[in-house]
Image (cartoon, grey):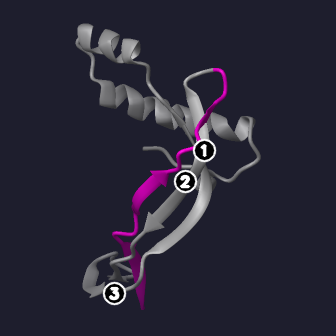
């Protein structure tokens, strides 16, 4: 029997509101609007995992207001990274995963409740 799998269901944009507060570090939080667009799904054979059909969807955007937290990298850290010839994106990606793994030690949440990048 076939299964279905979501396709292109990533967040489209995250608009951050104007009231931003800092918490004594580079970390900030404030109101945000999350918008996602679901464009379709794959039909997949359960035994083989092979995709046998793509189904396009024409649905309205899903939008909701929430609170967001983010960390702004200081310009001095960016400059030091550049001067040392290191790749900023790789370091930020690794730091994001480290934060995701440490988050449940400080905040009651499920892994699906948080995301990076």
Query: Do residues under tags 3 and 1 come within 8 Å of each other at their CB atoms?
Result: no
Please name the residue that numbered disc 2 is placed on.
32
Q: Is residue 22 covered in magenta?
A: yes
Q: Nearer the viewer, residue 62 or 50?
A: 62
Residue range of the region highlighted in magenta in the rendering: 1-24
Please name the residue that numbered disc 3 is placed on.
58
Residue under the point 59% across and 43% down: 19
**Mark 1 element type:** strand
CA separation, marks 3 and 1?
31 Å
Is 87 positioned to the left or the right of 65 in the image? left
Residue 26 spot, x, y in % from top left: 55, 24
Q: Which mark lies nearer to you, 3 or 2?
A: 2
**Mark 3 element type:** loop
Q: Earlier in the sequence, mark 3 or mark 1?
A: 1
CA separation, marks 3 and 2?
25 Å
**Mark 2 element type:** strand
Please name the residue that numbered disc 1 is placed on.
30
Residue under the point 51% across and 70% down: 63
Q: Relative to 88, is 67 above or below?
A: below
Residue 94 spot, x, y in % from top left: 43, 31
Residue under the point 58% across and 39% down: 20
Q: Which mark is residue 66?
A: none
Residue under the point 46% across and 65% down: 35
Q: Residue most toward the bottom?
A: 1
Q: Earlier in the sequence, mark 3 or mark 2?
A: 2
Q: Nearer the viewer, residue 47 or 53?
A: 53
Task: Classify 10 Å Cα crowding around label 2: few (below 14), some (14-19), many (20 and above).
Answer: some
CA separation, marks 1 and 2?
6 Å
């Amino acid at each position: 029997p076939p299964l279905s799998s979501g396709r292109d269901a990533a967040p489209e944009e995250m608009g951050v509101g104007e009231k931003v507060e800092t918490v004594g570090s580079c970390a900030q939080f404030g109101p945000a609007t999350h918008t996602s667009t679901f464009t379709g799904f794959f039909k997949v054979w359960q035994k083989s995992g092979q995709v046998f059909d793509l189904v396009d969807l024409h649905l309205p955007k899903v939008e909701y207001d929430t609170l967001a937290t983010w960390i702004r990298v200081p310009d001095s850290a960016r400059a030091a990274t550049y001067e040392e010839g290191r790749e900023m994106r790789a370091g930020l990606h690794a730091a994001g995963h480290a934060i995701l793994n440490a988050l449940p030690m400080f905040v009651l949440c499920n892994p699906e409740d948080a995301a990076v990048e």
